[in-house]
Image: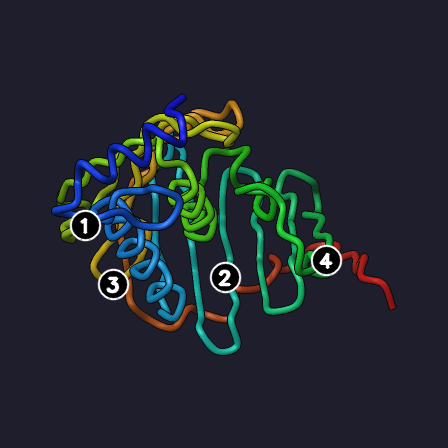
Amino acid sequence: MRSPLLAVLLCVAALATGCGDAGVPVGTDRLVRDMTRQLERGSQLRYRADYQLAGGNRATVAQQASPSRVAYGYPGGVLIVGEQERTACDLVSKPPRCEVRALAGASPGPPGSGYPEPMKKGLVTGPVVADLLRLVTLQPESTVKPHDTTIAGLPASCLEVYGLVDAPVVNFTACVTADGVLASFSGVINGVIVDQALVKLELRVPDPAELAPPNGANVVDLRQP
């Protein structure tokens, strides 16, 4: 692990570019900040996205902006996140079973803690990537390499991150479209191999059924009265 003194010396040696917070070179800090802002812009979009996951599985994301509501469909389930509640549905059960819980309070957990159901099935969400990027800014020992690519016919900006410590993932690559939609993610996160890629993006208002539990589901409200 790079010592604090070494981090300072490296920053002094790189005065041409300067250093950002926590000793992170400004170039790295700018790359991470730009992608974070892209994801923030994407959170205000109305769209439906289709993804291919590892093993040939498929997933979907449907999002409306106001009021904020996002449905993450993944093999065997769907997670619907509103402004004040989250609804996790098990589609394997017959009929499907959904549990509604209040969103966690102001004390966030580790990256991905709010989206365990899709992550276990190989679907990483935009908010999880944003949390991981915040970790990068706190770890000057990590390495960040940018590149551009085309995914599903759309230009995308990518960051390859290596060497995170005390994190759910050590190395990962994330790509984001110009509109701010997560285009791809690859890495081993919490022991799950994730290799997802956007295959179709529609910038439209999702159908109400795409943002609701499936018809006939047994919905249990576990929020405190």
Q: Is residue 133 above or below residue 85?
A: above
* Kind of element beneath mark 1: strand
Q: Position of residue 56 (x, y in %)?
A: 35, 29
Q: Amino acid at mark 3?
A: Asp
Question: Do residues under tags 4 and 1 come within 8 Å of each other at their CB atoms?
Answer: no
Q: Quadrant of the C terminus?
A: bottom right
Question: Label 4 vs label 1: CA separation?
Answer: 35 Å
Question: Do residues under tags 4 and 2 come within 8 Å of each other at their CB atoms?
Answer: no
Residue 194 located left or right of residue 159: right
Q: What numbered label is drawn on residue 156? A: 1
Q: What numbered label is drawn on residue 100? A: 4
Residue identified by numbered label 2: 70
Question: Label 4 vs label 2: CA separation?
Answer: 14 Å
Mark sitting earlier along the chain (3/2): 2
Looking at the picture, tell me which residue is in the foreground, 223 or 207. 223
Q: Amino acid at mark 4?
A: Val
What is the crowding at mark 3: few (fewer than 14 residues within 10 Å), some, or many (at least 20)? some
Residue identified by numbered label 3: 179
- Which residue corresponds to the image point at 43% horizontal and 25% vertical from the top-left? 188
Label 4 vs label 3, nearer the camera = 3
Check the image and tell me how it is coloured. rainbow
Mark sitting earlier along the chain (4/2): 2
Mark sitting earlier along the chain (1/3): 1
Question: Label 2 vs label 1: CA separation?
Answer: 22 Å
